[in-house]
Image (cartoon, rainbow, N blue to C red):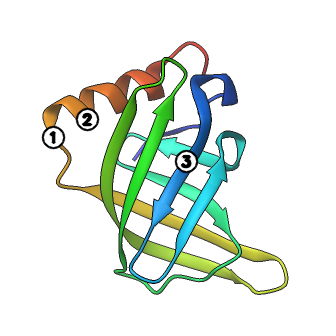
Amino acid sequence: MSARKVNGSTFHDNVSVQGREAHLTLSADSVVILRSGIEFRSPTAFPAWTEMNLALRTSDNRVVNCSGVVISCSGNKHAGYHVSMIFTGMSKQAQERLGKLVQSPLA
């Protein structure tokens, strides 16, 4: 898995992460986009294998909808949690859009 932090100017506003019992809206500078996943800080812990939906909004106002699974969540309630997710079941079109964001010279 290769990691490149996506520059905040690539995203319009926020990244929305939603699980069955939680919904987070994250600022663009608080996430790291990977080719096959995402990492972010959260005030809420998520158990491993939790399925979640994500909506990534680009600067040209396009939305990339993704599904993912939490593979790691470490930290504590005082300092926050570092959550790592892998994407699952992405369409070819979503993979291409995400690939362009990760490869962007702005990243």
Residue tagged 2: 94
Give the side of residue 33 with respect to residue 25, left or right: left
Q: Of residues 37 and 21, which is closer to you in this image? A: 21
Q: Quadrant of the C terminus?
A: top right
Circle 1 sits in a helix, a strand or a loop, which is it? loop
Q: Quadrant of residue 4?
A: top right
The disc, 1 or 3, on the residue closer to the chain's N-terminal end is: 3
Residue drawn at the location 55% of the way across and 77% of the way down: 73
Residue tagged 1: 91
Give the side of residue 102 with respect to residue 95, left or right: right
Q: Position of residue 97 (x, y in %)?
A: 32, 26
The reply to whether the C-beta atoms of the residues labelled 1 and 3 are less than 8 Å apart is no
Q: Of residues 14 and 32, which is closer to you in this image? A: 14
Amino acid bearing label 2: Ala
Q: Quadrant of residue 68?
A: bottom left
Residue drawn at the location 61% of the way across and 16% of the way down: 106
Q: Position of residue 86 (x, y in %)?
A: 36, 59
Amino acid bearing label 3: Val
Circle 2 sits in a helix, a strand or a loop, which is it? helix
The reply to whether the C-beta atoms of the residues labelled 2 and 1 are less than 8 Å apart is yes
Amino acid bearing label 1: Ser
In the figure, 34 relative to 45: above or below? above
Judge depth for marks 3 and 2 and give the one in front.
Answer: 3
Circle 3 sits in a helix, a strand or a loop, which is it? strand
Q: Position of residue 11 (x, y in %)?
A: 58, 30
Instruction: Report the disc number at residue 15.
Output: 3
Judge depth for marks 1 and 3 and give the one in front.
Answer: 3
Q: CA distance from mark 1 to mark 3?
A: 19 Å
